[in-house]
């Protein structure tokens, strides 16, 4: 509880500090809006031309896009310490100071930064979600709302877990590793669309290794009433847990890596 | 000698031809130095290639699935080749010279002002070297990979030899456009002192309207007339369309002058901006 309190308090402080330069903040938020708007525009244009893909119609595709971008940018907004600043912390040796304090390293990393500009991206994602659920005539019942929230929550854990891999590589090699971006940002780009449209190898990659399909898409497809792999209803509530599994596994690896950490600062 | 020509004050040299030759050799050596620097980052290069290849494969898988559901008049192979060329020359669009904006922000630009060279051309050459070297050293290995991939996934050879020549010439004009635009953004950095806002905005527009996020050929047909005239389409879209044969050779008479026109316009406005900047220059830092 103490940890949570600490985290919320630092988020509050960081938010305040970001808003000290309102003009710059607005400009950058606007840029984010255009960026994510551009991604959505690409989906809209593709749907205009192709109308749909496999069993998925326009509304379903917007819904998948929306759930992915809300989840990804929520993580980037509140987990920026890990997703954004961690490599420079290792390079500059700033991580040393975190090791001295009587709190967990990951807690402190997460407390160290936030990125409120991402609100613009989250807004675009939410728009796509609402648009999609409206076009696909989703009837919102309580279990479905809970399912959506569960998917997003565990989705955030999954993405944090994947960024932890990058952090582990970073501790061992001091450099930020572009290669790992393929799995995080590549996963985001690929899983904006339901995975069953892809060839088998990619499906396996995004179901078993980086389980975006299990965490986000199985629940999403149940909300839309078109099960992704044809699995029964109750599985949709279970599969998102794999996000927590990935996170825990990566957290263990991360702790081990921190044990091997050698400072590069002076 | 290379180094000397960078520093020797030859402004007052009376013989015009000699001065010209010296100027050219100066810009060439800046080009070479800057290009060499870009070549140093080979680790980043390998990482970049793997990353871009993966992204390319994902995009192609998506377009294949879409075409499976609803075939279009535009051949799928053209879209696939388009995606590969976009990924291969990604670095041409999106590489910013961080050193250069730092120079402006910290006052290092004062040193460049002392050089016996025109500031605009100096930076133009710098930017061009970075973009050309960066995109060739990533683009060539990536295209080799793309050619080796199985049919339907890999890139196709150019439509014909004349098409290839047209594409190369268009690519050169496109490169000039990119560098001129980048130089304009740099010029604005001197005014606003915050490179992020405008640079970010420019990059986003480029990603969308140069065909990186979605091939311009897949944009609605009714938009084509307008988007192909924008400066962003001149950068990579025009050369790629020549390569795949989406532009017939007869179109060269229309497209190449359009590209050249944009290049001239962008260079002209960039020069104007820099001239204005130099007149009322405030050096940052101390």
Image: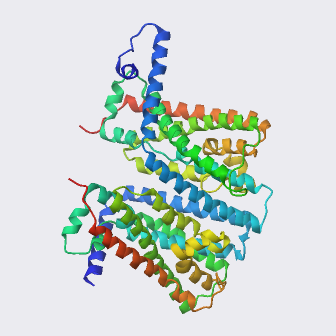
For residue A146, side relative to residue A92 (left or right): right
**Residue A144 position within the rendered picture, expressed as x and y whole percent measured from the top left:** 56, 88
Q: Nearer the viewer, residue B36 or B179?
A: B36
Examine the rendering and report whether any part of residue B166 can be seen: yes
Displayed quadrant of residue A58: bottom right
Q: Is residue A143 above or below residue B38?
A: below
Taking the spot 76% from the left edge, 66% from the top edge, the residue there is B68
Examine the rendering and report whether any part of residue A114 can be seen: no
Displayed quadrant of residue B260: top right
Taking the spot 58% from the left edge, 82% from the top edge, the residue there is A218
**Residue B198 position within the rendered picture, expressed as x and y whole percent measured from the top left:** 46, 48
> Residue pushed farthest top?
B14
For residue A228, side relative to residue A182 (left or right): right
Q: How many marks?
A: 0
Q: Nearer the viewer, residue B196 or A50?
A: A50
Taking the spot 57% from the left edge, 75% from the top edge, the residue there is A129
Question: Which of the colour schemes (rainbow, by chain, secondary structure, one colour) is used?
Answer: rainbow
Taking the spot 74% from the left edge, 54% from the top edge, the residue there is B77
**Residue A89 position within the rendered picture, expressed as x and y whole percent measured from the top left:** 30, 60
Q: Quadrant of the N terminus of chain A?
A: bottom left
For residue A215, side relative to residue A231 (left or right): left
Q: Nearer the viewer, residue B88 or B189?
A: B88
Q: Is residue B9 above or below residue A217?
A: above
**Residue B63 position within the rendered picture, expressed as x and y whole percent measured from the top left:** 69, 62
Q: Is residue A211 above or below residue A188?
A: below
């Amino acid at each position: 509880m103490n940890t949570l309190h600490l985290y919320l308090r630092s988020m509050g402080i960081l938010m305040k500090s970001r808003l000290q330069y309102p003009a710059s903040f607005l400009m950058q938020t606007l840029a984010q809006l255009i960026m994510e708007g551009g991604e959505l525009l690409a989906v809209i244009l593709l749907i205009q031309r192709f109308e749909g893909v496999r069993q998925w119609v326009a509304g379903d595709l917007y819904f998948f896009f929306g759930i992915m971008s809300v989840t990804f940018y929520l993580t980037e907004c509140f987990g920026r310490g890990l997703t954004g600043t961690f490599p420079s912390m290792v390079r500059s040796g700033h991580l040393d100071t975190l090791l001295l304090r009587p709190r967990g390293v990951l807690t402190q990393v997460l407390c160290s930064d936030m990125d409120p500009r991402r609100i613009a991206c989250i807004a675009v994602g939410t728009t796509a979600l609402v648009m999609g659920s409206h076009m696909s005539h989703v009837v919102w019942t309580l279990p479905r709302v809970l399912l959506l929230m569960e998917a997003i929550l565990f989705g955030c854990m999954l993405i944090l877990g994947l960024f932890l891999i990058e952090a582990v590589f970073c501790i061992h090699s001091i450099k930020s590793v572009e290669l790992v971006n393929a799995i995080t940002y590549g996963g985001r780009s690929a899983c904006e669309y339901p995975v069953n449209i892809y060839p088998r190898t990619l499906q396996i990659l995004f179901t078993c290794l980086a389980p975006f399909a299990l965490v986000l898409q199985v629940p999403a497809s149940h909300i839309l009433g078109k099960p992704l792999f044809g699995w029964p209803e109750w599985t949709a509530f279970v599969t998102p847990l794999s996000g927590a599994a990935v996170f825990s596994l990566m957290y263990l690896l991360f702790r081990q890596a921190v044990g091997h950490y050698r400072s590069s600062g002076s | 000698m290379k180094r000397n020509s960078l520093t020797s004050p030859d402004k007052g040299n009376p013989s015009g031809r000699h001065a010209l030759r010296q100027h050219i050799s100066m810009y060439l050596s800046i080009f070479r130095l800057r290009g060499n620097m870009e070549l140093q980052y080979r680790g980043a290069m390998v990482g970049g290639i793997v990353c871009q290849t993966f992204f390319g494969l994902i995009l192609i898988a998506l377009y294949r699935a879409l075409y499976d559901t609803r075939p279009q008049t535009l051949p799928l192979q053209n879209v696939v080749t388009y995606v590969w060329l976009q990924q291969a020359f990604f670095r041409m669009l999106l590489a910013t010279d961080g050193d250069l904006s730092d120079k402006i922000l910290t006052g290092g630009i004062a040193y460049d002002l002392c050089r016996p060279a025109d500031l605009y051309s100096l930076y133009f050459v710098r930017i061009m070297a970075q973009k050309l070297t960066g995109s060739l050293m990533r683009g060539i290995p990536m295209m080799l990979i793309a050619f080796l991939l199985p049919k339907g996934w890999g890139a196709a050879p150019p439509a014909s030899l004349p098409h290839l020549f047209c594409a190369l010439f268009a690519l050169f004009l496109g490169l000039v456009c990119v560098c001129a635009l980048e130089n304009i953004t740099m010029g604005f950095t001197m005014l606003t002192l915050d490179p992020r806002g405008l640079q970010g905005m420019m990059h986003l527009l480029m990603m969308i309207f140069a065909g990186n996020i979605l091939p311009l050929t897949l944009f609605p047909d009714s938009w084509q007339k307008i988007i192909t005239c924008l400066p962003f389409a001149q950068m990579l879209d025009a050369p790629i369309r020549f390569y795949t044969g989406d532009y017939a050779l007869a179109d060269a008479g229309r497209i190449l002058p359009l590209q050249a026109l944009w290049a001239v316009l962008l260079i002209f406005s960039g020069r104007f901006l820099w001239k204005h900047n130099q007149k009322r220059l405030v050096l940052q830092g101390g």
